[in-house]
């Protein structure tokens, strides 16, 4: 689907704070992205993507899905904020060169709040997961 | 590390498992050009990294977040409006390698609450 150069048409974040590369899949209830860890990433420390990077990667995967649907509906991509994160488990910090595949599922929508669950995998191996409430500003 | 690029610690106190720190956020840091253009907001994710760095710096050990039971972001922190952030962090050592942490960041009001556990890494 959308490559790195136009992932920026889907999310409000801009370099150097972009934590997704490519939109792999998107439908009404789920979104999947890929992300390769590079040395220059501002959330890479000591050769590894930080917990903060994993959390942001999940949030931006949700943002890419919201942006994809906004593009289809011809409405502008809006800024979203993380309202809360629950049960964020980190099993490992991925290294430079690793390719992550992140999937979010929309669990519920309540007014401007979207409740998602997200997983980050590397070659089918679970790296991190959480539930997240994302607030879309109007 | 974000320390000395995204933020500086201007004062810090540590006793009885409680760390109180005042952080000065560098509003010129490069991350604000992307989060968001023309509208700087301290990323919630960066607060998680700050908690880890303050723990590592204070306890002279390396940690990885094992699980955050809950992180709540209650207010947006715009460093161009207010670049001082207070961190209050309480930790308890549960065994050889595990650390439970409760922390909150505040400006005029609390902007982030964190509850979770870290695991100490072998150096």
Image (cartoon, grey):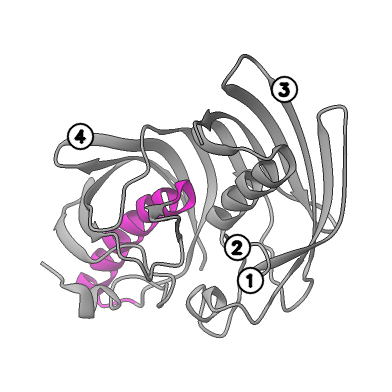
Mark 2 and mark 1 residues within 8 Å of each other at the beta carbon: yes
Which residue lies under the disc numbered 3?
Answer: B92
Mark 4 — on which chain does it sit? A
Are marks 1 and 4 in one subunit?
no
Mark sitting on residue B5: 1
Q: Is residue A28 above or below residue A72?
A: above
Q: Which of B78 and B97 is in front in this view?
A: B97
Q: Where is residue B53 in the image (x, y as percent from the top left)?
A: 63, 49
CA separation, marks 3 and 4? 31 Å
CA separation, marks 2 and 1? 5 Å
Which residue lies under the disc numbered 4?
Answer: A125
Which residue lies under the disc numbered 2?
Answer: B2
Find the magenta span and give its range. A50-75
Q: Which of B5 and A58 is in front in this view?
A: B5
Closer to viewer: mark 2 or mark 4 = 2
Mark 2 and mark 4 residues within 8 Å of each other at the beta carbon: no
Mark 3 and mark 4 residues within 8 Å of each other at the beta carbon: no
Secondary structure that dominates the magenta span: helix
| Disc on the earlier residue, 3 or 1 | 1
- Residue B121 drawn in magenta: no
Are marks 2 and 4 in one subunit?
no
CA separation, marks 2 and 4? 29 Å
Q: Which of A6 and B52 is in front in this view?
A: B52
């Amino acid at each position: 689907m959308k490559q790195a150069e136009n992932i920026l048409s889907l999310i409000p974040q801009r370099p150097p704070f972009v934590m997704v590369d490519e939109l792999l899949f998107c439908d009404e209830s789920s979104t999947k992205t890929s992300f390769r860890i590079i040395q220059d990433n501002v959330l890479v420390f000591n050769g590894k993507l930080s917990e903060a990077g994993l959390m942001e990667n999940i949030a931006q995967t949700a943002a890419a899905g919201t942006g994809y649907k906004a593009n289809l509906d011809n409405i502008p991509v809006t800024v979203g904020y993380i309202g809360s994160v629950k049960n964020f488990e980190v099993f490992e910090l991925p290294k430079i060169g690793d390719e992550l595949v992140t999937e979010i599922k929309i669990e519920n929508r309540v007014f401007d709040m979207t409740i998602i669950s997200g997983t980050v995998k590397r070659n089918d191996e679970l790296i991190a997961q959480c539930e997240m409430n994302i607030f879309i500003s109007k | 590390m974000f320390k000395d690029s995204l933020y500086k610690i201007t004062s810090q106190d540590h006793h009885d498992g409680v760390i109180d720190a005042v952080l000065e956020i560098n509003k010129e840091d490069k991350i604000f050009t992307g989060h968001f253009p023309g509208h700087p907001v301290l990323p919630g994710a960066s607060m998680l990294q700050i908690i880890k760095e303050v723990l590592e710096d204070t306890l002279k050990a390396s940690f990885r977040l094992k699980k955050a039971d809950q992180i709540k972001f209650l207010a947006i922190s715009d460093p161009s409006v207010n670049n001082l952030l207070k961190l209050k962090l309480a930790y308890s050592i549960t065994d050889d390698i595990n650390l439970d942490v409760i922390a909150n960041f505040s400006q005029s009001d609390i902007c982030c609450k964190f509850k979770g556990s870290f695991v100490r890494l072998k150096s």
